[in-house]
Amino acid sequence: MEKLAGSVALPRGRSRVPGGARRAANRDPGAIRRGRCRTAPRTGPRAAPGPRFCGASGLRPAAPCPGYAAEHCRCSRNRPMITHVLSIVADGVLLGLIYAITGLGLSLVLGVMGIVNVAHSAFVMLGSFLAFELFRRFGVDPVLAFVLALPVFFVLGTVVYRVVITRVQSAAQTQGLVAMFGLMVLIENLGTIVWTTDTRVVTAAYTNTSLEVGGVVLPYVRLIAGGLALLLIGAFWAFLRFTLTGRAIRAMAQNPEAARIVGVDIQRLSAVMFGLGIACAGAAGVALAMVFPFSPNTQVVWLAWAFLVVILGGLGNVANTLFAGVAVGLIQAVCTAVMPFDYVYLVLYVLLAVILTVRREGLSSAVRRTI
């Protein structure tokens, strides 16, 4: 191979670009391609291409991709499209089950009693901190905390009904709304005093483990939280459908005066119904704490999710609430996959505004009460 005059033989694989041109090319990678930098003419056979590297991480690789083949480079991050879509759907369904129980208590209380319980999310937040304290102090698993939250928050709900609701139930609906808003602010500020505004997490032994089915990765923590939510929804449906107390609650929701005439204790059933709604909120808080970080301020976001579930699913309809929660979870999963997470909340509020604009009558007549 002939050498150019004044040139120096370089080892194989080294660039023949002069130093000044090479430094200019480093500053402007496209300079050589556009002809700004003068290069020495290429002589000799072209070097064989080296192994391809995976650029999925955006970093300079230190070694060839382990999945390198002659045709193309495969990386674990570059999953097939169908697997990616199935992962988004599975994630949305599991999140939707949790959102369903978040909105279920609000839907039942609003559909049966006509009370807009804006403090619902504050009790959800208390459920999250109950799971946190039980896990931090006593090592109680979140699954057990989910079960313990039901009786604890049922009693708390009946107490709130006797102390607060009975005093404003016969007054105008706006007074009840103001009372529940004041209760929400009180609980949030008490939570800030006790736990501060720091973000907390509940990290169980199975938090960072997952199950892979056909390339679809399912985190165990979401599988467990979604399964518990589905069991609770089924238990609520069976209670309202097959038990004597549940049938009395349905009769009270359809016609309170007729139920009172036939001997139904409206006050007792109202206390039971409100207690069940708060129990559902507390259990939802435990499920949310298993999946998301939380603080006393996150209850505002959870309230928006709960209202969106109520709007989509209707008042007092357990089955429709389940489907609405799954729809909301799918919306969040799809939005998270295609846009930054900060914009997901923007989509939420826009969707709320659009639905409330279409249904101008508001939540109380969004759908027929079908409990």
Image (tube, helix red, strand yellow):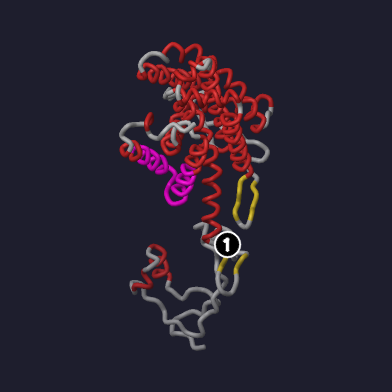
**How far across and down, in percent of the image, does residue 294 sit?**
52, 32
Residue 236, picture quadrant: top right
In the image, 338 versus 231, the foreground residue is 231
Query: Is residue 344 depicted above or below 17 in this figure?
Result: above
**How far across and down, in percent of the image, does residue 357 sit?**
31, 37
> Which residue, as the protein is rendered here, is positioned at the far bottom?
2
**How far across and down, in percent of the image, does residue 114 sit?**
42, 23
Does the segment drawn in magenta span residue 344?
yes
Q: Circle 1 sits on which residue?
A: 75
In the image, 88 versus 371, the foreground residue is 371
Residue 255, picture quadrant: top left
Q: Amino acid at mark 1?
A: Cys
In the image, 210 versus 177, the foreground residue is 177
Q: Which residues are magenta?
A: 327-353
Query: Is residue 347 depicted above or below 235 in this figure?
Result: below
**Label 1: few (<14), some (14–19) or many (≥20) C-alpha neighbours in 10 Å:** some
Answer yes or no: is residue 126 visible. no
**How far across and down, in percent of the image, does residue 364 sit?**
38, 29
